[in-house]
Image: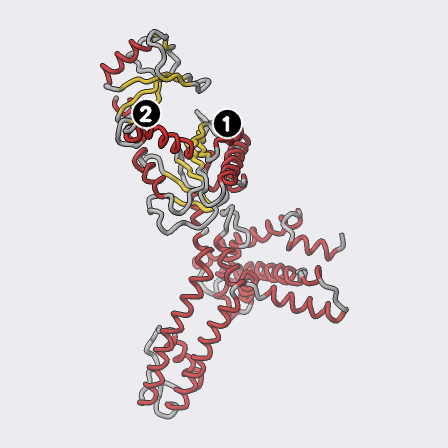
Amino acid sequence: MTAGDFLHAAFHEPRFRAYRIVESVVWTLILLSILLLIIEPFFPVGSRGDMVLQGFDRVILSLFSVEVSLRILTYRPPELEVFKRTPLGRLRTEIVGRIRFALTPMMLIDILTVLALVPALRGLRVLRLLRLLRTARLFKYANPFYGVMRAFQEDRLLFTFAFSVLGTETILGGISLFLVERGANPEINNIGDSLWWGLVTITTVGFGDITPVTTLGRIIGGAMMVGGMFTLALFAGIVGHSLLHAVLSIREEQFRMSGYVNHIVVCGYEMGSGMLLDVLVNAINTDEQPVVLFGPYERPRELPPEFMWVQGDPTKESELSKARITQSANVIITGSRRIKPQQADAATILTAFTIRSHLSKSRLAAKRKKPVHIVAEVLDSENVQHARAAGADEVVETRRVGYSLLAHAVSYPGIADATSRVVFAGHQNLYVGALPTTVTAPIAFDQLSQEMRAATGCLVVGVRDPTTGRERVNPPKDELVAPEMEVLYLATRPLSEQA
């Protein structure tokens, strides 16, 4: 590695150890600068302590200037990696590329920082605090500060146009007022005064230090005010277009760093699936167990505000921590209705497999009292076993269930309404739970049904083995129910809420 390659790596290649050393030095200088800014006000201007602090400050700024200069000089324009250049063309590309690099938002902040070496510009020293944005490690997925800087860089043509309009209006208005009132207005002594008035007027700030006194001057001022309204609207549109996504990315980091635990994550929610949310609201208390929707697109407009939306791809393991999957209680994976059933089931299976893989690698998941419960929706019955093999604890065949209910209703009219009342929350729902403490097991199924009916009013319809997950609905009345078995029962609410 040549000296040039080493310097380039030290200032532009994060994977090299030299880069981390340089960043550590920069952090140290920033912290020292903060310390100087804090203690400097305690020393009178011109005192010995003030002079010593200024000396230290000049040394730090000199080191900053060396670091900024080396960062610009060691920059390599990407065009040189793609295109062949003649020696003269290569020199031109390097010069133009470094100038463009120096004019990027982050580098402009660094350059303004070192300008504080000029005594008249010492007030710029505080800008060095913005150097913290370059080395910030707080945000994992989408650093909004970098997003804002990138938005300025990518939409620089829009901002150039907006500032050109502002500059043109200021110059035209300022020169026009100077020519009209330079002899009549005592507040306008030179062209700088009129340009200052033009900028203050066009931005609708209106300090009032300079006001037109002639009729034509006031007409110019009125035109500037109206133009200022359109100019502000132009800036608002450009800023809204450029910075909205960068600012909204904070939501992902906000949720990742939040204290959400025991929540429900819904993967695959689509616009128009509002019925799913209605059912969830009726089935659970969303205040105690929040529902988080996790999808690869922006938050749908029709989504109620009480639901948290996290943008991300649930089929990518690197993005699952956005929704705090490890800390969740349940994960619901729904199938898409916009594509073929086989394709929708393939996405469901991949999502379940990705979540299980992520949980198996998490140290925090190993400390859970019980594992994350994954419920997957499958549209094609052939994919049920595939979904279970991918890691789904329960698989719901929504299409088959619906079609079976329709066919059964034809043979036995009225059964569809009764089944709906069993399924829908707020009616007689089917629940599963441990044997009540008042029941002495082992006990015959018929006697168990009678005791629970008398004590709680619920109707026992079957038993379930929690180890194997095997259920027996309406078993023989003399079948013994072991203490570790769970019961399936119909009730208006779970027995745990009736206690």
Q: Residue at x 30, y 11 (%)?
A: 448
Between marks 1 and 2, how big is the CA–CA gap? 31 Å
Q: Nearer the viewer, residue 459 or 147?
A: 459
Q: Is residue 426 left or right of residue 378?
A: left
Label 1 amino acid?
Answer: Ala
Where residue 256 sits in the image (x, y, percent)?
45, 42
Q: Is residue 343 above or below residue 170?
A: above
Q: Residue at x 40, y 38 (%)?
A: 259
Where residue 275 sits in the image (x, y, percent)?
34, 41
Within 10 angstroms of label 1, few (less than 14), some, or many (20 or more) residues? Answer: few
Q: Quadrant of the C terminus?
A: top left
Tell me which numbered mark, 1 or 2, is placed earlier along the sequence: 1
Does residue 63 show up? yes
The tag on residue 430 is 2
Within 10 angstroms of label 2, few (less than 14), some, or many (20 or more) residues? Answer: many
Identify residue for label 1.
366
Q: Is residue 240 above or below residue 446?
A: below
